[in-house]
Amino acid sequence: MNEKKFCAVILAAGKGTRMKSDKAKVLHVLNGKPILHYTLEAAKKAGAEKIVAVIGHQADKVRIEFANSGCVFVEQKPQLGTGHAVLQAKIILADYKGLTVILCGDVPLLKSTTIKSLVENHISSKAVVSVLTTIPPPPHAYGRIVKDDKGSVLKIVEHKDATEVEKKIGEINTGIYCVDTKFLFSALDKVNNNNQQHEYYLTDIVEIAVREGQKVKSFIVSDYVEVMGINTLEELARAEIYLLA
């Protein structure tokens, strides 16, 4: 049994309202290819056994664009948050024995070597959940990684919910995870939407793991630009410059 086996779930349902366009965010073009292409390629190169893309906004266009990509599509409608998005992959991955790596369709600069390192670190640290993190320059509004004195992750606090002390934490959540598949879907079944947005947050699986006495670790990416999400046309332009460098 190859312990490093994993499937990838790519979250690609978003509309991307800040892109000032009707086009689905993952279909915006970066250096001649749709943004989603880069995440798919990184997952393949890292060795994903199966890739599930969770789509929503302009789902048909995304399916057509990536018809020959070898990935399986599941649709999220209505869109009730990141936890709910991953839950759409349950029908495909429920009995999968390996790990699940959750990726973002709008993070095109992520390297396949980083995905591999995340998986290896997850296995060697015997974690049930591993969060890919980074330390960007302030100010920013990302979710903070709260740890105990042993360096294990206790919770992820959204910027708007963070205390002044928590806002001083440098390490942030990139929205990319490696999770034991069986735990992932049992935890997602326990996630509720008792929050301001009334959404099912994927980040809640961290606190569920901690509550159940499981280990949660973070893996820090040194280059914060590599895990930058594309939310605006300005960020898209910045990513082009980075790719051409």
Image (cartoon, rainbow, N blue to C red):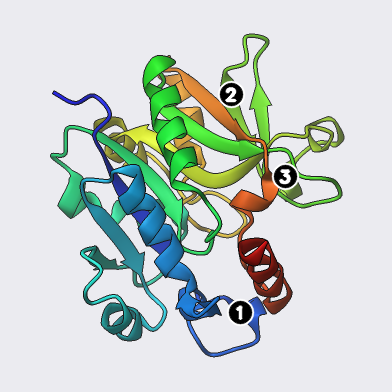
Q: Secondary structure at mark 2?
A: strand
On screen, residue 106 versus residue 167, left or right, reads left
Nearest the viewer among 181 and 160 is: 181
Dot 3 corresponds to which residue? 161
Of badges 3 and 1, the one in the foreground is 1
Is any part of residue 207 visible from this angle? yes
Q: Label 2 neighbourhood size at 10 Å, few (<14), some (14-19), many (20+)? A: some
The amino acid type found where label 3 is placed reads: Asp
The disc label shown at residue 32, or none: none
The crowd level at tag 1 (other Cα within 10 Å; few <14, some 14-19, many 20+) is few
The residue labelled by disc 2 is: 154
- The location of residue 14, given as percent across then percent down, is 48, 71
119 relative to 241, above or below: above
Measured from the top left, where is residue 118 in percent x and y? 46, 33
Residue 43, above or below 149? below
Judged from this view, the residue extending furthest toward the top is: 150
Kindly state the secondary structure of the residue where label 1 is placed.
helix
Amino acid type at mark 2: Leu
- In-front residue for pair 31/216: 31
Q: CA distance from mark 2 to mark 1?
A: 32 Å
Q: Residue furthest front?
A: 245
Mark closest to the chain's N terminus, 3 or 2: 2
Give the residue displayed 81% in from the left and 38% down from the top.
Answer: 167
Q: Does 161 sit above or below residue 183?
A: below
Name the spot of residue 171 as percent of width and height, x first.
71, 34
